[in-house]
Image (cartoon, grey):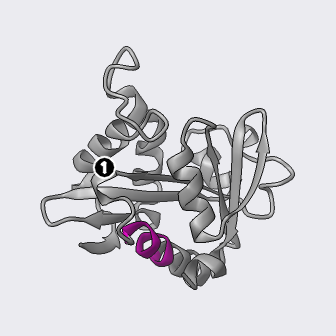
């Protein structure tokens, strides 16, 4: 398994992983009226703007996992998303909004830790203070993974807000 920066050549595989993990970590195929909508909304802005912030786990047969942060509210806005809905008082100090998709067959094998370490090193080098992500109550696999990696957490009506400094990710 290789951890590397994503390229546009990874786009089709990343779209597949996004769909196959898009329903609380489970397969989201058929859950929306068009299976292309989920990756259009939750992948494309990150892959295309800027692609250099996306990292993948390449299993040799194609991309099997992806981490993609948007570094700050300006980038989120420019990427076509709504930063005011992604930032609140708890996440504002760590403004990079993170999405992570990992196929179940790669989970619990250390690939996520290696992926997060590479991402943390990159973000820290770029001066990005840290990341935050939202995890729904139904995705306890992701909650447990974030806890093992040392994310701080806050639970509210929207699920879990998980945060971590880039330096902490880089030290994994």
The residue lying toward the viewer, choosing from 41 and 150, is: 150
Judged from the image, the secondary structure of the residue bearing numbered disc 1 is helix
Instruction: List the single residue furthest toward the top.
Output: 33
From the viewer's perspective, is residue 157 above or below residue 94? above
Magenta stretch: give its range.
111-118
Majority SS type along the magenta span? helix
Q: Position of residue 144 (x, y in %)?
A: 57, 56
Task: Please say whether residue 17 is visible from this viewpoint.
Answer: yes
Q: Is residue 88 left or right of residue 51?
A: right
The residue lying toward the viewer, choosing from 117 and 4, is: 117
Q: Is residue 62 magenta?
A: no
Q: Which residue is located at x 68 percent, y 67 percent?
A: 164
From the viewer's perspective, is residue 145 above or below residue 103? below
Instruction: List the single residue furthest toward the left.
Output: 61
Q: Position of residue 16 (x, y in %)?
A: 27, 41
Q: Position of residue 19 (x, y in %)?
A: 34, 36
Q: Which residue is located at x 59 percent, y 47 percent?
A: 78
Q: Which quadrant, please, contains the C terminus?
A: bottom right
């Amino acid at each position: 398994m290789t951890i590397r920066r994503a390229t546009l050549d990874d786009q089709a595989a990343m779209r597949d992983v996004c769909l196959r993990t898009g329903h609380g970590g489970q397969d989201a195929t058929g859950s929306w009226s068009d299976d292309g909508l989920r990756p259009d909304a939750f992948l494309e802005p990150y892959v295309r703007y800027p692609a250099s912030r996306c990292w993948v786990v390449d299993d040799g047969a194609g991309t099997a996992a992806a981490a993609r942060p948007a570094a700050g509210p300006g980038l989120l806005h420019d990427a076509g998303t709504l930063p005011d809905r992604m930032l609140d008082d708890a996440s504002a100090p760590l403004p990079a909004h993170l999405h992570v998709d990992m196929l179940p067959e790669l989970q619990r094998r250390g690939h996520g830790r290696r992926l997060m370490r590479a991402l943390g090193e990159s973000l820290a080098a770029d001066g990005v203070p840290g990341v935050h992500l939202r995890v729904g109550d139904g995705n306890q696999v992701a909650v447990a993974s974030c806890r093992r990696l040392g994310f701080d957490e806050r639970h509210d009506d929207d699920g879990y807000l998980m945060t971590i400094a880039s330096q902490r990710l880089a030290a994994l």
